Amino acid sequence: MVSIIANIYNMNRKIVFYRLGNGESPVEEFLDTLPDKAAQKVIAVFKVIEENLIVSTRFFKKLTGTEIWECRIMWQSDIYRILGFFEKNNFIILTNGFHKKTQKTPTSEIKRAEEYMKDYKRRNS
């Protein structure tokens, strides 16, 4: 019984970048636009999300009323968000990223993530 519990608690998440039908990745394209230090911080947050059973909402939070989650990154005075969804419990498919400039997550970015999620599920079911 103890080994079963240990296996449950050792289950790591795996982050995967969504790819369009043509193979392009909106998240990779977004990361390419970031300064090196900001991109390093994003990768560090990804590692926290993948390796920890419990992750602070400072780094990862479900958006109310959606199936979309956001990776939350702050670097100096800049705020970045990368949206995605869970697939098969331990996989997080990241769909799109943006530089956050308003208090609320823009509806257009949430809708984009939802469209990418539908496309992903359609192509991978």
Image: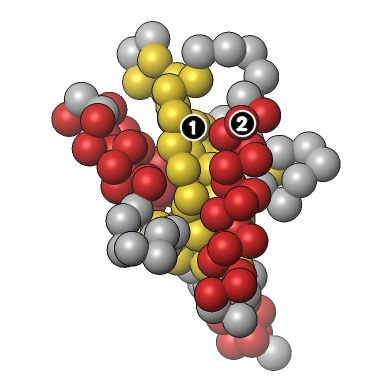
Of residue 16 and residue 113, the one placed in the foreground of this image is 113
Of residue 80 and residue 27, the one placed in the foreground of this image is 27
Q: Position of residue 60 (x, y in %)?
A: 57, 41
- Disc 2 + disc 1, Cβ < 8 Å: no
Q: How many marks?
A: 2
Q: Residue, x 57% and y 42% (percent of image)?
A: 112
Label 2 to label 1: alpha-carbon separation:
13 Å
Q: Secondary structure at mark 2?
A: helix
Lateral position of residue 45 relative to residue 5, left or right: left
Lateral position of residue 113 relative to residue 51, left or right: right
**Looking at the rendered structure, which numbered label has been put on residue 108?**
2
Snapshot quadrant of residue 3: bottom right
Q: Residue, x 64% and y 49% (percent of image)?
A: 114
Residue type, label 2: Ser
The C terminus: image quadrant: bottom right
**Crowding at mark 1 (Cα within 10 Å: few <14, some 14-19, many 20+):** many
Of residue 76 and residue 124, the one placed in the foreground of this image is 124
Q: Position of residue 51 (x, y in %)?
A: 44, 58
